[in-house]
Image: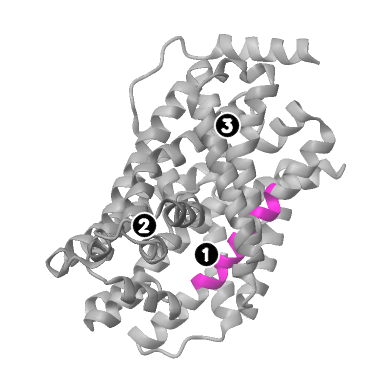
Amino acid sequence: MNDQANSVEQRFEAAAPAELSSWNRHDTTWMLGLFGTAIGAGTLFLPINAGLGGFWPLVILALLAFPMTFYAHRGLTRFVLSGREGADITDVVEQHFGIKAGALITLLYFFAIFPILLIYSVGLTNTVASFLEHQLHITPPPRAVLSFVLILGLLAVVRCGEQVIVKAMSLMVYPFIVALLFLAVYLIPHWNGGILTTASQVPAPSALLHTLWLAIPVMVFSFNHSPIISAFAVDQKRRYGVHADERSSQILSRAHLLMVVMVLFFVFSCVLTLSPEQLAEAKAQNLSILSYLANHFSNPTIAFAAPLIAFVAISKSFLGHYIGASEGLKGLIVKSGKRPGAKALDRIVAAFMLVVCWIVATLNPSILGMIETIGGPVIAAILFLMPMYAIRKVPAMARYRGQMSNVFVTAVGLVAISALIYSLTA
């Protein structure tokens, strides 16, 4: 088996480009696609969740944001790249850890990502219904009809193929970046110190560590784009061959730099405008920062723009998470022993996604947040711990051993998982 894998790898490397080409449009599209998957509706709650801990924890989290996200996603990308040609994450797990482990990880991978897709289906329907009713003063159609049309529209993009999905997401990123920048700059004249009022109160080390412990998962998942990493790595290997690791690291570093700079500017602009008490009020009201700011300033522009920004944010995150969820479902179907053709498999997965997302969006259940929280530890384990374990155990990843970043990623993963479990039991 190893001889066959090595011969396939050697033939693949022989067909790979001899030198790494210069940065191109394809790389930019992927950079924005990664940004689009990570930066979505959760960004609109990040200023509230991150700002409530006070000034010093927020500064520490800001400094940790880039290394936490970059090293973790680079590790997961390298894990997928270590597999044979064309192998996605579910195949690579089976290749390295065996059939039983592959089936278990595929199952967990699917059930960690799919509930997030359901949450986006509900959020998209709620956002559009509210926009029609309150901003356009139009009576929205029945919820079943509205949710069906919205989900069918997004799945129409999905049916065009992975490259079209990534291009659509990268195009949707532009208005979102502009909107975040506009809001952050709009708030500058209203900066009144906000969270700086807590800067003089340096918390005790134990209190600081406790705050950071509970806040790290919030930061981790605000920048999480693990559902699209497998497709990203497969495409980089197909395009760049032996240079895939180098180019994917370049794309990831630029994507994460864009994420961190944009989002932290937005976060700090919000927390310098609103006091800790106002952030706590927004959390108690379960409002996004956009909705709270619109009410705070009684600004019709923000009130009109907020649902449009949320629509773009949710739509592009839905598309990115669909790639991961469909990948997991296809893996489950194949590992169950059934081997439908590629087109038939795509149709089965699309039909399943449409029906389940439509039913959940129509019913509008309130338990989805809990499901997402339960999925959090699984995502953290797959994103942080599994690649680091593979570096220690898998010969194909031996060249990455001994790096300090591995220790850092493992530590952050353990912190994130323990904090999420604590939050569930508290």
Circles 1, 3 touching at the beta carbon (< 8 Å): no
**Residue at image location 69% in from the left, 14% down from the top:** 8
> Mark 1 vs mark 2: which is more N-terminal?
1
Residue 347 on image: x %, y %: 70, 53
| Mark 1 → mark 2, Cα distance in angstroms | 49 Å
Q: Is residue 344 left or right of residue 145?
A: right
Name the residue beneath numbered marker 1. Answer: 153
Instruction: List the single residue furthest toward the left.
Output: 189
Q: Is residue 18 left or right of residue 392?
A: left
Label number found at residue 203: 2
| Mark 1 → mark 3, Cα distance in angstroms | 26 Å
Instruction: List the single residue furthest toward the right.
Output: 337
Q: Of the residues tagged 1 and 3, which is closer to the observer? A: 3
Residue 270 on image: x %, y %: 27, 65
- Count neighbours of disc 3 (C-alpha within 10 A) and say few if under 14, some if 14 to 19, many if 20 or more: many
Task: Check the image and report above or below for 133 versus 289.
Answer: below
Mark 2 is on which residue type? Pro
Mark 1 is on which residue type? Gly
Compare residues 108 and 322 and report the one nearer the observer. 108
Q: Is residue 113 visible?
A: no
**Residue at image location 60% in from the left, 43% down from the top:** 414
**Magenta span includes 385:** no
Q: Is residue 16 left or right of residue 358?
A: left
Name the residue beneath numbered marker 3. Answer: 234
| Mark 2 → mark 3, Cα distance in angstroms | 45 Å
